[in-house]
Amino acid sequence: MARDTGRKKDKKDTGRQLIAQNKRARYDYHIDDTWEAGMVLMGTEVKALRAGRASLVDGYAHVMDGEVWLEHVHIPEYTQGTWTNHAPRRRRKLLLHRREIKKIIDRSAEPGWTLIPLALYFKDGKAKVEIGLARGKKSYDKRQAIAKREADREMQKAAAARFRRR
């Protein structure tokens, strides 16, 4: 018979569990550098994220008074929440080390650079956001990216066809 030792088992999630990804950002921007940041969230926001509901499409980050803030990221209201529910598009503070914030301030101060959220996920049970320092692509850059992707796809097809003939 197994004996209960009285210790609680650690049921904390491990690894990376993706909640939302901003695929459009990699198409519209050249991503120069990325950082992983924690977020200051309310309880109902965490529960809504655990349900796998969020949108990063209109989101961006900026520095204000030496702190980095995430704006316009949509985390819908928790359905079982009461009057304590959160506003879906409220401003959320990002948790970064001081040296990372200083680097972000220095790099994003140059004209044309912006901070955008790339992914929202749980890492070891904590909500994290990946933000990237980005510069907007021109329309010809986007066309080149599409042409390169199609050329790579055709090369893969040709290589697969050649391999099957052998």
Image: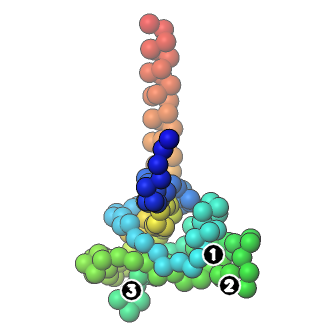
Amino acid type, residue under disc 1 in the picture: Thr
Q: Earlier in the sequence, mark 1 or mark 2?
A: 1
Amino acid type, residue under disc 2 in the picture: Thr
How many marks are shown on the rendered structure? 3
Residue 145 in the image, given as x and y percentages of width and height: 46, 49
Residue 70 in the image, given as x and y percentages of width and height: 49, 78
Q: Secondary structure at mark 3?
A: strand
Residue 101 in the image, given as x and y percentages of width and height: 31, 79
Task: Count residues near mark 1 (Cα–Cα under 10 Å), then give few for <14, some for 14-19, many for 20+.
Answer: many
Residue at label 2?
84
Viewer-side label of 3, 2: 2
Residue 44: mark: 1
Q: Are marks 3 and 1 in contact (CB under 8 Å)?
A: no
Determine the residue positioned at 42% across, 72% down: 38
Determine the residue positioned at 50% across, 30% down: 154
User: 12 and 115: which one is in front?
Assistant: 12
